[in-house]
Amino acid sequence: MISTACYAIVPFQLLRQYPTGEDSTGIVFGDVDDDGDIDLITANRGSSNVSVLYNNGASVFSETVNFPTGGVPRYVDGGDFDGDGDYDLCTSDYGGMTMSVLMNDGQGAFGIASQYDMHVPAFHWVDDLDMDGHLDILTLHWDDKVEQPSLHPAIFTPLFNDGNGNFTYGSESWIGMQPRGGASADLDGDGIKDVVTANYISKTVSILMGLGKREWSDEIVIQLTGQPRYVLLDDYDADGDIDLAVLDKGDNHLWVFHNDGSANFTLEETNDTSNIPHSMESGDVDNDGDSDIVVTHVGSTQQLLFLNDGTGHFPTVQVLIMASGPAEVQLADVNSDGKLDIVTANVNHQMKGASVLLQGSCYEGADCNNNGVSDYCELPDCNLNGFPDECDITSGISTDTDGNGVPDECQIDCNFNGIPDYYEIEQGLVGDCNENAIPDDCDWAVLADCDEDGLLDGCEIDDNGDFIPDDCQCIADFTGDSIVAVHDLLLLVAAWGAEPLPHDDPWPQDLNRDREIDIHDLLILIGAWGECPVATLPNISGACCISQSVCIEITETACYVRNGVYHGDEILCSDINCTNP
């Protein structure tokens, strides 16, 4: 979490940021667990899931759970699709070529209920498009029937809901190339919803007028310069009809078009934005009765709040500092105080995948350490409980074993014993035989010690690199007589020099496995001279499942050193099925 600053027109508190999945680009909000407060959901294109951030009731999102989606979800939206009273989700899976519908189990957990094929779904949103009382899904996607879909007109396809969360494809309509944003509303006052899209490559806005009975007119084109990235529909000039705002990613502009009431739009105002604007949302942020516009930028820390003067013009611009590449933005009353707050998905940093910027002052509210700053605004708050770490420690909510001012639960504790790992190692409470700053009991699932000398197998000397401690094998006993002596020396000397290539396994005399029998191997043999160790293990192998579902046939000791799952002596890999142990 980081701090924020702004030119204080609308006061905002400190920016709080929360971990999500990877590369979060989309965000939506809703009360997913039916506890009366606003939760957040991000679409994570890098990890192909959604992150649900649960509000703890104090506007702090202290718990996050990820749920799988289709591949590379760019955006997420939601609503009650099946009429059971809870908030469901849908994602546009850009890489998976699907629209995924995730149903809520009533407790705020989600699973994929259905998926609908859609070629490169670039954007989607939810609306009751046919006004039958059921939320539909509106999708913008590429045309898979042409040779170069990215350079061909794209398609608008609605998915109509039967009221039970089952969707059917509606009729397709042509729009511009590479749509990046869309919205729907009744533009001409005929009681039928129309559709507008921003088309990045064709540099156009497409308008599809609703004809009723789930049909739309041919595309009406507004040709623009720059690269239209996002659209909003709202009544900005308070004349009773729906106006249009378009974000220009290419030349960094916000265009505002006024509607004459018949869906004829006139460019009323062009505003400069920060670098690479990505998303925007409108709402009455300053509570003066008109709709303002907030714009986020993936190429700038300066996010912009355009304040409406009541006539559909935006002469006042407030700068909000928000780092980590805010992508999609929404306005939501996160803390139920009647004021719209700003929430964003952040594409640049997994540990800051969602941002929350609340309206209000940092000098009002609970102040646990009496320093004049409200607890919500005071950072660090590593455990996301709404209280500064200092107060957690002094009040006894958290322990600070090492006295570094950071609650123990916020430091790495791989064995979950409540003590930070580095402190355990530093104080000698646990071993770290390989000096990798990880306690030994976390390095290996099975803490084996084949020679019972108190040193774990993974930390023993292993000159030949076979994952078996040298103390538990007799690698220089080439004759198999349990002693390293002259006969073994003669066999090594006879093999002296580089091994011929190609061949499979290294020769036995190549004790350090460097493909050459030389002085290094001789020194290893001399070091092993005499009777073989008492702890010498039998050379019996079996199937061992290691990471990435790979099976190899090695000894039990070697399997445990490699953190594998051993399936038994003389068991063959062909007889078992590895599933990522």
Image: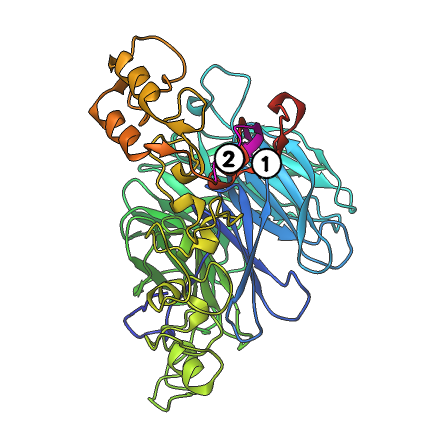
Residue 185 in picture, x, y percent from top left: 58, 49
Residue 187 visible in the current orientation: no
Residue 448 - label: none
Q: Is residue 134 left or right of residue 552?
A: right
Q: Residue 522 occupies which quadrant of the picture?
A: top left
If the image is split into quadrants, where does the N terminus sit?
Answer: bottom left
Vertical arrangement, residue 305 with respect to residue 198, above or below: below
Determine the residue positioned at 32% across, 69% down: 3
Residue 142 in picture, x, y percent from top left: 51, 27
Furthest toward the bottom, the residue is: 370
If the image is split into quadrants, where does the C terminus sit?
Answer: top right
Vertical arrangement, residue 207 with respect to residue 350, above or below: above
Work out how far the residue at label 1 is from the one at label 2, CA to CA, in angstroms: 16 Å
449 or 481: nearer the eye? 481
Q: Assign a secondary structure to mark 2.
A: loop
Vertical arrangement, residue 341 with respect to residue 127, above or below: below
The amino acid on which the numbered mark 1 sits, given as a three-letter code, is: Tyr
In the rendered image, residue 546 lying in the magenta stretch gets the answer yes
- For label 1, the residue is 566
Determine the residue positioned at 38% across, 40% down: 228
- Magenta segment boundaries in residue numbering: 535-551
Mark before the other along the chain sequence, 1 or 2: 2
Task: Please tell me how crowded label 2 is: few (under 14), some (14-19), or many (20+) other residues with Cα within 10 Å.
Answer: some
574 or 73: nearer the eye? 574
Q: Residue 370 occupies which quadrant of the picture?
A: bottom left
Q: Marks 2 and 1: in contact by CB < 8 Å?
A: no
The colour style of the image is: rainbow
The amino acid on which the numbered mark 2 sits, given as a three-letter code, is: Leu
Q: Assign a secondary structure to mark 1.
A: strand
Task: Please tell me how crowded label 1 is: few (under 14), some (14-19), or many (20+) other residues with Cα within 10 Å.
Answer: many
- For label 2, the residue is 537
